[in-house]
Structure formats: C-alpha cells, structure tokens
Amino acid sequence: MRVKLVAGNWKMNGSLASNQGLLSAIIPAIAPFSRMKCAVCVPFPYLAQMRQMLGGSNIAWGAQDLCEFDNGAYTGGVSASMLADFGCRYVLVGHSERRGMFGESDEVVAVKFGKALAAGLTPILCIGETLAEREAGVTENTVARQIDAVIAHSGVKALGQAVVAYEPVWAIGTGKTATTEQAQMVHAFIRGRVAAADEEVAAALPILYGGSVKAANSAQLFAMPDIDGGLIGGASLIADEFAVICRSAQPAD
Ligand code: 13P
C-alpha cells in the first residue's frame, strides 16, 4: 500500500512574514493527519525558516531545484549537500518551469536527480507533456523519454528512493486540470514503463499528479488507482485549500 504524499510547491513566492502566517495555519491543520505525508518545497532563502518552524511537525520540507555540480566554483549554485544541511527531505527535479524557462535538458535533470539521491534527499522527478505534445499525440513518448533519461543515468533501482510527479504543462497554473481519467491513463503508463525495468520498484513508486489541483478536485484525483497524491502550486499558498487537499489524501477509516 503506497502512502499518499501531498507536496506544496510554493514556486517563487513568500516572505518571512507571509510564510510565518501560512505555516502557523497549516501546521495545526495537518497535525491530525497521520496516514498521509505532507511536504512543502520552498525558495532556498526560506529553508532555515522551514527547519525552525516545521522541525517537530509532521510536515517535511524541501527545495525546488539544486545544482548539478558538487560544492566548488559554481557561483549562484546551491548543492545537494547544502540542502541536506538544512534538513531538506525532498527536492523537486526537472520542474517544467526549470525545463522550459531555464533550459534544463533531460540529461541535466538526470544528473541533478543523481546528486539529490547521493546526498540522501528524495528527489521528486517532475515530468509531463506540453499542450503541443498532447495535441500531437506524443504524450507517452515525452514522459517515457523523461523517465528513461533518469533510469539510464542512475538505474531503475534509484527510483525506489524517489517520487515521480506527472504534471501536464498545459494544466499548470491554467485552471485546466487533466480529467481523472486522462491523469490515471498517463500514471498507469508511467508505472508500466518502470515495471518493464523492475516490477517491484514500479509497484512501490509514488506517482503524484500536479496541475491546478485544488480542494474541489483533489479527492477525485487521489481516488484513482495510480495517483498517489499531488504536487500543488497555487493552492499550496492558501492554508484552507492546502489542508483540505491533505485531508483528501488520508485513506478513509
Ligand atoms: P498549479 O497547482 O498552480 O497549477 O501548479 C502546479 C505545479 O506546477 C506544481 O509543481
């Protein structure tokens, strides 16, 4: 039985004061949920604040990116070991905004994934097709290529220490959610792709859905057999929305 995970991706939002307000509301709201996992992935400067405020809570924290190199002369970079130093459990790798706006290739994403694992972090590997790719009927080719790059670099067993997030690019921040059936089909395809290399790893692999998940649609999405939780953008910045999404990831009594 895979335990569901709900991870907030704050993207480039927040301030010390607004984070404090948001977390003060989220921490007690999530505290009773013992049968799901919750995390927030925040901008680098706020990791110290997460460690201070979330240490001792049932909310883990992580970053949204990491450098593909180890410590050294890489001005502006933030290494995997630095994230581990700040108590991160998770790090997003290959978010579509990184791939699309910052030119991250499948190969760079695969190297980052390997660096995260080597530092003891759990990478959340983000994959998904653009609208043009969906319309051209190549959704499966795209997600297969993205996952295969990681398997080629780190081996399929590495996915045993990771999380995959399927985020159709056309559903991110647009208010357009993939239908539960559309999402389930791609999730099942991803699991099948991994199963072809290792059935045990595939059966245990958490696959999150991301893209306009909100309180009003999370329960239906999370009820699908291959959807193991969500990666939440906009709605993770609203305490009540995020709490309802987390509650819907708790298995029924
Ligand atoms: P939204 O939930 O705002 O659509 O963002 C999804 C996302 O990109 C999470 O990583």
Image (cartoon, rainbow, N blue to C red):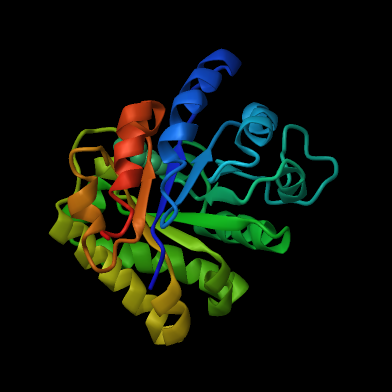
Q: Is residue 121 above or below residue 79?
A: below
- Please identify the residue farthest to the top as the structure is shown: 17
Quarter of the displayed picture in which ligand 1 can be seen = top left
Regarding residue 10, the answer to whether it shows in the image is no
Residue in the picture at 39% in, 82% down: 195
Horizontal side, residue 200 vs residue 47: left or right? left
Q: Residue at x 50, y 24 (%)?
A: 24
Q: How far across and down, in percent of the image, does residue 19 sit? A: 53, 22
The picture quadrant where one finds residue 161 is bottom right
Side (left or right) of 68 relative to 144: right
The percent coordinates of residue 80 (x first, y second) are 71, 50
Q: Image quadrant of residue 153? A: bottom right
On the rendered structure, is 138 left or right of 44? left
Residue for point 62% across, 33% down: 50
Q: Residue at x 51, y 16 (%)?
A: 18
Locate the C terminus by quadrant. bottom left
Q: Nearer the viewer, residue 165 or 206?
A: 206
In the image, residue 185 above or below residue 178: below
Q: Position of residue 164 (x, y in %)?
A: 44, 60
Residue 201 placement, left or right of 247: right
User: In the image, is residue 2 above or below residue 45?
Assistant: below
Q: Looking at the picture, how far across and down is residue 129, in whole percent?
A: 30, 53
Residue 202 seen anywhere in this rendered image of the structure: yes
